[in-house]
Image: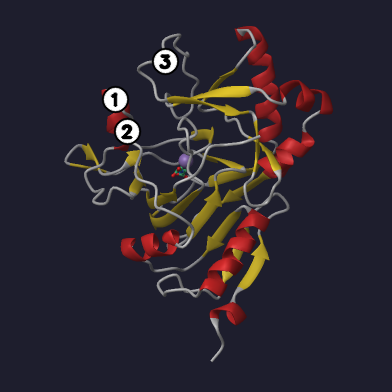
Amino acid sequence: MATVLETMKITPLSAACGAEISGVDLTQELTPATVAAIRQAWNDHIVLVFRGQKITQEQQLRFASYFGNLGRRKNAMFRQELQQRTHGTKQTDPNVLLVSNIKENGEPIGAFGEGEMWFHIDSGYAEKPYNYTFLYALELPSTGGNTQFSNMYKAYDALPAKLKSELAGKKALHIHEYERSAKVEVKEDLSQTAHYFHPVFSTHAETGRKSLFVDRLMTARIEGYSKDENEVLLEQLYEVGERPEFIYEHKWQLDDFVMWDNRCAIHARTWFPPEERRLLRRCAIEGAPIHE
Ligand code: OGA
Ligand code: MN
């Protein structure tokens, strides 16, 4: 009988990033050799897509655990409104977050609600942002709600040399304070806001490649610049980070399982009809401090 390693096939999905992996059944335990092959594909393609998987929550968590320690839901420590954002009535495991707009008896069953979501890094406001995020599609709207991934290695490489040298060694403030698709005013007093300063450029611990590590949703400012300077600088960085040629847009099908590397990709969500149900099951892997 053919082994998983022999049946596994890797097919790139776009020139930007992303690859589909077929021939692997995620309900099964995988050998270290298969896990190593998936990790290699992950380092090569940033985003991996497995289609037609029928996985339970336990199987999803077991698979994710091959790649590190599961990351607990990061409940906002401070403000009540933010806490409610990740509080969902159907989230039974502290390592699972349901991404959903569904409400039952007026209460959200999961987090992140409806509508568009700007490009972001998951838990970029933490000292150790997640290394990886995994999403599994359980219910989908008839249109929209696509997840876009932008290759931040390519963004770094494409930055003008002057900007690269200007921002080398600089740190940016990431905050847990957002409106999903709008900018929030940054408060002077950050004592009530989860936040962290990370290098603007990060070096990936496994690939050794440099990437741009800022996002439109939660990066508030770069240290050492005025508000006006920041507006210009950040817009320049976002423009490069969100160039269409660096983006793979995933159009979900039921039973898709998508996993991405949060250290070298930012991701966003497109609009979908709010009256239609959308439900994805998310888990993540703990990360480490970001180094330039
Ligand atoms: C997430 C996320 C996007 C989506 O789960 O971290 O950003 O498409 N999801 O719902
Ligand atoms: Mn996200």
Q: Residue furthest right?
A: 161
The reply to whether the residue tagged 2 has its Cβ within 8 angstroms of ligand 1 is: no
Q: Residue furthest left?
A: 105
Q: Position of residue 261 (x, y in %)?
A: 56, 49
The residue at 44%/53% (across/down) is: 135
Amino acid type, residue under disc 3 in the picture: Leu
Classify residue 179 as left or right of residue 36.
left
Identify the element where label 3 is drawn: loop
Q: Nearer the viewer, mark 3 or mark 1?
A: 3
Q: How many numbered marks, from 0 up?
A: 3
Distance from Cα at disc 2 to Cα at disc 3: 19 Å
The residue at 27%/31% (across/down) is: 84
Crowding near pointer 3: few (<14 within 10 Å), some, many (20+)? few
* Residue 235 vs residue 209, the one in the foreground: 209
Distance from Cα at disc 1 to Cα at disc 2: 7 Å
Crowding near pointer 2: few (<14 within 10 Å), some, many (20+)? some
The residue at 72%/26% (across/down) is: 168
Q: Position of residue 80 (x, y in %)?
A: 26, 24
Residue 229 — which label?
A: none
Q: Earlier in the sequence, mark 2 or mark 3?
A: 2
- Residue linked to disc 2: 85
Give above or below for 65 relative to 79: below
The reply to whether the residue tagged 1 has its Cβ within 8 angstroms of ligand 2 is: no
Q: Position of residue 217 (x, y in %)?
A: 52, 28
For residue 141, say whether it is visible: no
- Residue linked to disc 1: 81
* Residue 141 vs residue 161, the one in the foreground: 161
- Marks 2 and 1: in contact by CB < 8 Å? yes
Q: Earlier in the sequence, mark 3 or mark 1?
A: 1
Residue 190 — which label?
A: 3
